[in-house]
Structures are given as structure tokens and as C-alpha cells.
Amino acid sequence: MNSHNGGAEQIALVPEHRNGPFGDGAKLLRFGRFCVVPEARQLLSDGRPVRLGGRAFDLLLVLLRARGSIVTKDEIFCSVWPSLSVDEANLRFQMAALRRALGEDRDVIKTVPGRGYLIATELIAVLEAGKKRLAGETARAATTDEVQLLRRETRELKEVVAEQALELRLLKKSMIADGRDEE
């Protein structure tokens, strides 16, 4: 993959908690307000599921795993459509579907003419900072250890709540798939 890695630190690969919904050591990919759960093939926005087709999901994974680097069209074709011959119209269609799913953050996916695509991680950081300022949620530096501890605990609790909500949704889906009624 070609390099344009100005902000790869904005995409976090997070190991799942042992007692989380995927006790098999599944990973979460986080970027901006989004979280991708590869093993569940699910995209979450602020903890809520986002509808995304299979090929568009594969395309998102390829771009995220490049961590801000350019991914060529050939690399995308090999990863998203292995052993299939598809034309560029298919890629454009899936890219449009992915951008639609990202909503107001669609611009984080950049087309690099003649080279490929990338997720502009530095743009993710700017968008997030701008949204916080507009919402009046400007982060302040903690001045005491106690405040820092409370902030860390709050972040961890929010992650646990989001993971438990995801686990519950997946459990309900599996129960429905097994033919049992949803409660």
C-alpha cells in the first residue's frame, strides 16, 4: 500500500474485553464516532448500528486497515472481490454506498485521482473537534489525578454500555435466527 500516513493514530485497533460479546479475542476498529466490529460485520455510529451491505463493509475494512494510507483500486479488487472479475462501476457503487452510510462524515473517504482511496484520519480528528466545540463540549485538561481517574472511568463505562448493547442485539438476532420469539 502506498503511503500517506499523516494521521493513522486516529484509527484505533482495540482488543475486546475478555468477557465481551466476542470472547474469542475479536477486535474493534474505532474512527471518529464510528466503531467497526469485524467479526460481527457491523458498523456502529455512536453505539447504534448503521445499515451497510457486505461489499461496502469489506471496502470499509480494507480502508481502515490501511490506517490512512492510499489503497489502490487493484488492492481493493483483490480484497473485496477475490477471484472475481468486476468493473470499476461496481467499486464506485460500493464506495457511494459506504459514503452514504457514513452520513455527514462521508468526506473522510478521499479519492486520490489515478492512485486509489484512503480514509483521511486527520480529517476525522478535525471533524470531531469541531463537533465538540459546536456542542459546547470542549475538552479541558484535568488538573488533578481524581478528575483524570473519573474521566477514564466514565469513558470505560460508556464503552462497556455500548458493548453490552451490541451483545444484546447480537443475542436477539441469534435467537430470532434460531426460530425463537423475540422478547
Image (spheres, rainbow, N blue to C red):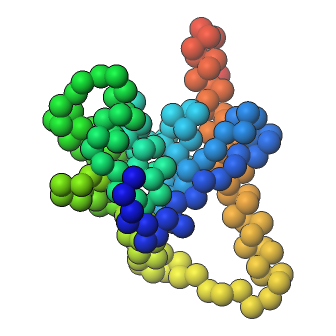
Question: Is residue 8 shown above or below 58?
Answer: below
Among the 4 quarters of the image, the one containing residue 85: top left
Residue 171 in percent (x, y) is at 66, 26
- Left or right of 71, for residue 24: right
Q: Residue furthest front?
A: 2
Residue 94 in percent (x, y) is at 27, 38
Q: Residue furthest right?
A: 146
* Foreground of the two, 99 or 168: 99
Residue 100 in percent (x, y) is at 29, 47
The answer to whether residue 119 is seen in the rendering is no
Question: Is residue 149 shown above or below 25?
Answer: below
Q: Residue at x 73, y 73 (%)?
A: 151
Q: Residue at x 72, y 39 (%)?
A: 25
- Left or right of 173, for residue 96: left
Question: Is residue 25 shown above or below 115?
Answer: above
Among the 4 quarters of the image, the one containing residue 123: bottom left
Question: Is residue 83 shown above or below 68?
Answer: above
Q: Residue at x 56, y 41 (%)?
A: 37
Among the 4 quarters of the image, the one containing residue 89: top left
